[in-house]
Image (cartoon, rainbow, N blue to C red):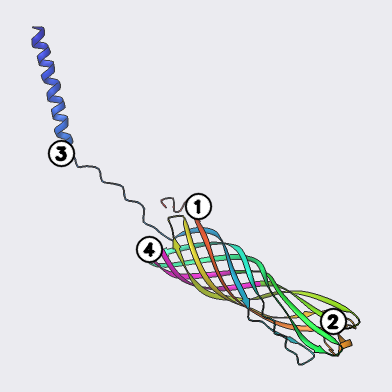
């Protein structure tokens, strides 16, 4: 009797296992979860470094003299922006701040009584620009343009056999910037870029409190107009982040 009951229980268990196995065989295998598609949309910030050179024109107001300094130098900075991708079209806004020493000096008047020289030094500048480009998967090609502002220092150096003096003034220049570049995404967060920008920072008048020093060598004016234009080339890296949880799948 006990053997019969044991056999019956064993047969029941076997049938249950067989039935479960058959059900599993008829069930489709789970599909792999696809990785989220890459998008340029989102906020980002980054750092960059580059080289700039001025296309600068200066003129002394009261005399027919045009100093021709050619400032150049390295700069570095940071940027912050937002991209919005629609199909392959990418629209964006970006602001950057740059610090450096884009500098040159030139002697623009030499007479027997002495020499007058001028120095121009652009120490920081910033831009706020729109961007429009086209995405080819992880590669973005774009153009950009907007407002530009820069702070420039100028000195007037007067050297005579009797004395030497330096006079200083600084001005803020406001203008526009335009250019283009490319950016390549290494993954969903990090990207690298290269960019060219042309900045037209406009014309400002620098007033040097020379007193009697400049007229000693026959120059009747202490004001100089500087028309500041700048070419820049830079490379950098950006990090994309999900500021408000809008792109949590990325």
Among numbered discs 3 and 2, the one appearing first in the sequence: 3
> Which residue is labeled 3 in the image?
26
Position of residue 68 measured from the top left corner of the image (x, y, whole percent): 70, 85
| Of the pair 20 and 211, the residue shown nearer to us | 211
> Which residue is labeled 4 in the image?
137
> Which residue is labeled 1 in the image?
244
Determine contact: label 2, label 4, CB under 8 Å: no
Please say if 12 is above or below 176: above
Among numbered discs 4 and 1, the one appearing first in the sequence: 4
| Of the pair 236 and 34, the residue shown nearer to us | 236
| Of the pair 206 and 99, the residue shown nearer to us | 99
Among numbered discs 2 and 1, the one appearing first in the sequence: 2
> Which residue is labeled 2 in the image?
159
Position of residue 171 measured from the top left corner of the image (x, y, whole percent): 73, 74
- SS assignment for the magenta stretch, majority: strand
* Residue drawn 87% across the image and 78% down it: 164
Q: Is residue 97 found left or right of 91 in the rendered image?
A: right
């Amino acid at each position: 009797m006990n053997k019969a009951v044991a056999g019956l229980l064993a047969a029941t268990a076997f049938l249950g296992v067989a039935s479960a196995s058959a059900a599993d065989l008829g069930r489709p295998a789970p599909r792999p979860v696809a990785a989220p598609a890459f998008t340029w949309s989102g906020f980002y910030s980054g750092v960059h470094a580059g080289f700039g050179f001025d296309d600068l024109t200066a003129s002394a107001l009261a005399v027919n003299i045009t100093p021709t300094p050619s400032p150049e130098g390295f700069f570095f900075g940071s940027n912050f922006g937002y991209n919005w991708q629609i199909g392959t079209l990418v629209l964006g806004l970006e602001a950057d701040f740059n610090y450096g020493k884009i500098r040159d000096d030139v002697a623009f008047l030499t007479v027997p009584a002495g020499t007058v020289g001028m120095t121009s030094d652009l120490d920081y500048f910033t831009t706020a620009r729109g961007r429009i480009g086209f995405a080819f998967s992880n590669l973005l090609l774009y153009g950009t343009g907007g407002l530009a502002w820069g702070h420039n220092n100028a000195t007037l150096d007067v050297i005579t056999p009797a004395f030497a003096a330096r006079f200083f003034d600084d001005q803020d220049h406001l203008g526009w910037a335009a250019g283009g570049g490319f950016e390549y995404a290494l993954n969903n967060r990090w990207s690298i870029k290269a960019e060219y920008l042309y900045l037209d920072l406009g014309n400002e008048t620098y007033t040097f409190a020379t007193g009697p020093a400049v007229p000693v060598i026959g120059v009747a004016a202490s004001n100089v107009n500087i028309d500041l234009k700048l070419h820049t080339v830079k490379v950098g890296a950006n990090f994309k982040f999900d500021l408000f949880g809008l792109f949590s799948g990325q």
